[in-house]
Image (spheres, helix red, strand yellow):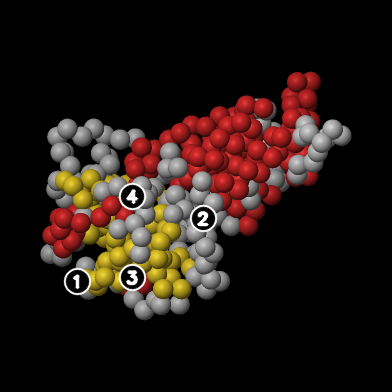
Amino acid sequence: MKLCALQFVCVLLMLSLTAAGPTSGHDGQMTPMEERNELLRRGEAALAHGDVGQAMEAFERASAMMHAPDSEMGLVRTYMQNGAYQRALSFAAHAAGAHREVSAGSVLYAWLLHVGGQTTFAQRVINEIEAKKPGDALVTQVRTQLRSPAPVANGALLTTPWRIAPFDPSAELSATAHVVCSGMLIDGGRHALVPLAQLGEARVWWVRNGLGRRRAAQVERRVESLGLMLLRLDDPIDGASGLVLASRDPFPGSPGFAFDYTAAPDATPAWPLLHVGFIGKPDGNSGLSKLGIKLLAGAQGGPVFDNRGHFIGIALRNTDGQDRLLPVSVLRHEFGEIFGSIADQASAQRMTFDAIYESAMPATVQAIIEP
């Protein structure tokens, strides 16, 4: 018990020093604690500007100086902004378990589980920390979002070091910009596909992926028959490599992994949400299938993958409110070679949830408009 109390006091002291910011010792040199606080400040600044390498170095140095939750949460978020979801999830589990006296570590871990399709486990993490810290405002806020049909990162949940969203290093958008739906990058990040109904009359379009990278886009083609719009990005989004396409459309009852973002009244960056289920039956003679996967976010247009990580189609909501899968065969026929390479189905192995999530982060985008 004495050791736990001592650890708690150390954490409180560390957090108070961090909040106070760096000062100089009597000899003009920074103390070790002041140096560590400066490293944390540099790490957050680098992450906000999209410099993942500098952020990684700063947070790692701070972690080497003290085993504390703030630097570890900084590293978790740096891994996420670098597209390393599996590493981030593993390290977030460590940060939550090793620092149970700080609720923020568990909040960040629970959110990563939730966006990766492990909502039941995320709720269990929140239940455990709530039992230890009843009435904690941050825990209450994240629980509300985890239970919401349209979860968003807002308010205190966007505070560093536990921020549950990526940074967008591009210039700030106008106050009227907002996320209207999801989409997906194709053609090595040079083009994007978004639902036509959602973006038909917007004045300005932007797309931003799960790593916080955003580009302006122009309408290249409207495909009324598919309900899609092809956008050409002003500059390619780096790291959005070509999709690996399934060699055939999915069978009814086969596993599906659908991604989307919550539509929001503002343009706050977010990590995509993964929803897991089974592909539905063919939908009449339309050539489409019922999606069969419940999309809680309600923002259509995101990609769907099979359990080998191969792209099998786009999730679209029809005018009757039903979710359907626009299959890979139809998309390949319409958009040809810019869509991606066809997988060797026989040689591919099944992927874990976290591996599929990691592969989809760079390709799944928020579609943002400025009216």
Q: Residue 281 at what x, y percent from top left?
A: 20, 54
* Proximity of marks 1 and 2: CB atoms separated by less than 8 Å: no
**Residue at x-position 36% and y-position 50%:** 238
C-alpha span from label 4 to label 2: 17 Å
**Vertical order, 216 against 275 (above or below):** below
Q: Looking at the rendered structure, which numbered label has been put on residue 218?
A: 3
- Residue 225's tag is 1
Q: Amino acid at mark 2?
A: Pro
Say few, some or many: other residues with alpha carbon within 10 Å of mark 4 (under 14 / 14 to 19 / 20 or more): many
The answer to which of 57 and 114 lies nearer the viewer is 57
View extreme (top): residue: 2
- Disc on the earlier residue, 3 or 2: 2
Tag 3 or tag 1, which sits nearer the N-term?
3
Helix, strand or loop at label 2? It is loop
Distance from disc 3 to disc 2, alpha carbons, whole Å, reads 21 Å
Give the residue at x 70% y 45%.
136
The reply to whether callout 3 and callout 2 are in contact (CB within 8 Å) is no
Q: Nearer the viewer, residue 4 or 208?
A: 208
Q: Which mark is drawn over residue 169?
A: 2
Q: Nearer the viewer, residue 126 or 16?
A: 16
Q: Amino acid at mark 1?
A: Ser
Q: CA distance from mark 4 to mark 3?
A: 18 Å
What's the CA distance linking mark 1 and mark 4? 27 Å
Residue 240 got which mark?
4
Residue 99, horizontal then vertical, whole percent = 65, 31
Q: Quadrant of residue 103?
A: top right
Please state which of the two labelled residues, at mark 1 or mark 2, is closer to the viewer: 2
